Image (cartoon, helix red, strand yellow):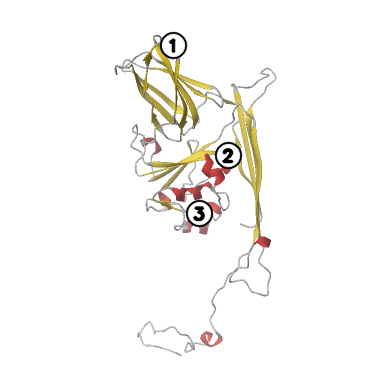
């Protein structure tokens, strides 16, 4: 891409209430029983996000079952309590994009003010859904090297997916740009069978089935690629790419970044002329991300109430390419192909013709 390109992503999660759901989301469900294995109804189940202190509650029904839906991706603590039983608290439960987590709890008889703490994340094997997919979490998105900071390159880590397949020929001819020069093939399918969603919102170009918006990797929480089997809510396509953006917390966090590629640091291309300088290639990707609590005049401390997250990224790229085309020799332009090592036939007679 030549010239200057700005406004690749401006994400604002301003004035987002702590209890607002952010799709795509996950679920937590399970049954609560006593030491004898009998199901316990009426148990208060409390789910807390330590980063924002957002709280969700649910009561078990007559079958001892509880369900917490539309949970934004993150790490949570779950607490189950009922009079006559010791409270049970399970910490560090990781909820991922589109996950359905089964967390069963066994209550022990005792005082309610006595707490049994259990540390452990969500189960690796999810039995509550038949969907098949892989989540690329925030750590891998931020720390793994990406040429051009396109998070979708990490989809090649998923079994059955590749980013080395053919791209959209019509997309490159009619629109061009980075999103039509990128190809993602999942389970051997063409790129036209991909469906992209960003925070539960349609992010698919209906013309060529490429992505519409490519968020900055610093603004992403995680993304999940599902293929073959997935819930009916996703609708069409064979491969579902669902991305979730980050949100603000009670702690003020921010980053400032710049990634540089420059031909002055590169070796000469094999096809470049030895006597000529290296063709220019200068790429600068820079921006910032900041998030935290909102402080209003009437709310001196915005903790646990209101949060914001802002991300901006700019791109400036200048480059030249070395191409080596083949042109006919002077004799060939006059119809003499005798010096050409290729065998040439008259298409009408299939007789060799060297002149």
With 130 as the anchor, is 198 left or right in this view? right
Inter-mark Cα distance, 3 to 2: 21 Å
Task: Give x and y (percent) for residue 147.
Answer: 56, 53
Residue 78 location, quadrant: top left
User: Is residue 355 depicted above or below 326 in this figure?
Assistant: below
Q: Are marks 1 and 2 in contact (CB under 8 Å)?
A: no
With 2 as the anchor, is 26 left or right in this view? left
Disc 2 target residue = 219
- Secondary structure beneath label 1: loop
Task: Give x and y (percent) for residue 312.
Answer: 64, 41
- Of residue 251 and residue 321, the one placed in the foreground of this image is 251
- Of residue 38 and residue 257, the one placed in the foreground of this image is 38
Disc 3 target residue = 182
Confirm whether residue 328 shows in the render.
Answer: yes
User: Is residue 141 depicted above or below 162 in this figure?
Assistant: above
Tag in front: 1 or 2: 1
CA neighbours of label 2 inside 10 A, class few (<14), some (14 to 19), many (20+):
many
Nearer the N terminus, badge 3 or badge 2?
A: 3
Inter-mark Cα distance, 1 to 2: 41 Å
- Secondary structure beneath label 3: loop
Confirm whether residue 81 shows in the render.
Answer: no
- Secondary structure beneath label 2: helix
Residue 12 location, quadrant: top right
Residue located 56% across and 45% down the image: 143
- Of residue 67 and residue 44, the one placed in the foreground of this image is 44
Residue located 62% across and 22% down the image: 303
CA neighbours of label 1 inside 10 A, class few (<14), some (14 to 19), many (20+):
some
Inter-mark Cα distance, 3 to 1: 57 Å
Task: Give x and y (percent) for residue 179.
Answer: 53, 51
With 131 as the anchor, is 173 left or right in this view? right
Disc 1 target residue = 112
């Amino acid at each position: 891409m030549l010239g200057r390109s700005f406004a690749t992503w401006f994400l604002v999660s301003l004035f987002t209430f702590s209890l607002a759901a952010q799709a795509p989301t996950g679920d937590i469900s399970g049954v609560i029983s006593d030491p004898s294995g009998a199901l316990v109804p009426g148990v208060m189940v409390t789910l807390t996000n330590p980063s924002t202190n957002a709280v969700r509650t649910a009561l078990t029904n007559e079958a001892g079952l509880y369900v917490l839906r539309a949970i934004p991706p993150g790490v949570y603590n779950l607490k189950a309590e009922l009079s006559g039983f010791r409270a049970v608290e399970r910490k560090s439960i990781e909820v991922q994009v589109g996950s359905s987590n089964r967390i069963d709890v066994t209550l022990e008889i005792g005082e309610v003010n006595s707490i049994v703490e259990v540390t452990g994340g969500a189960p690796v094997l999810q039995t509550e859904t038949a969907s098949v997919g892989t989540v690329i979490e925030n750590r891998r998105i931020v720390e793994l090297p990406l040429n051009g900071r396109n998070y979708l390159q990490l989809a090649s880590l998923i079994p059955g997916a590749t980013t080395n397949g053919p791209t959209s020929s019509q997309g490159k001819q009619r629109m061009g740009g980075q999103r039509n020069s990128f190809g993602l093939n999942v389970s051997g399918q063409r790129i036209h069978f991909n469906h992209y969603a960003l925070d539960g919102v349609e992010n698919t170009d209906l013309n060529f089935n490429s992505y519409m918006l490519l968020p900055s990797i610093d603004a992403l929480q995680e993304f999940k690629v599902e293929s073959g089997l997935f819930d009916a809510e996703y609708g069409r396509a064979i491969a579902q790419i669902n991305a979730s953006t980050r949100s603000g917390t009670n702690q003020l966090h921010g980053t400032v970044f710049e990634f540089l590629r420059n031909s002055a640091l590169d070796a000469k291309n094999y096809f470049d002329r030895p006597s000529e300088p290296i063709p220019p290639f200068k790429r600068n990707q820079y921006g910032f991300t900041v998030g935290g609590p909102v402080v209003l005049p009437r709310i001196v401390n915005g903790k646990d109430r209101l949060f914001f997250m802002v991300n901006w990224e700019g791109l400036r790229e200048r480059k030249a390419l070395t191409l080596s085309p083949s042109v006919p020799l002077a004799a060939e332009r006059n119809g003499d192909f005798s010096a050409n090592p290729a065998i040439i036939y008259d298409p009408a007679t299939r007789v060799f013709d060297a002149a």
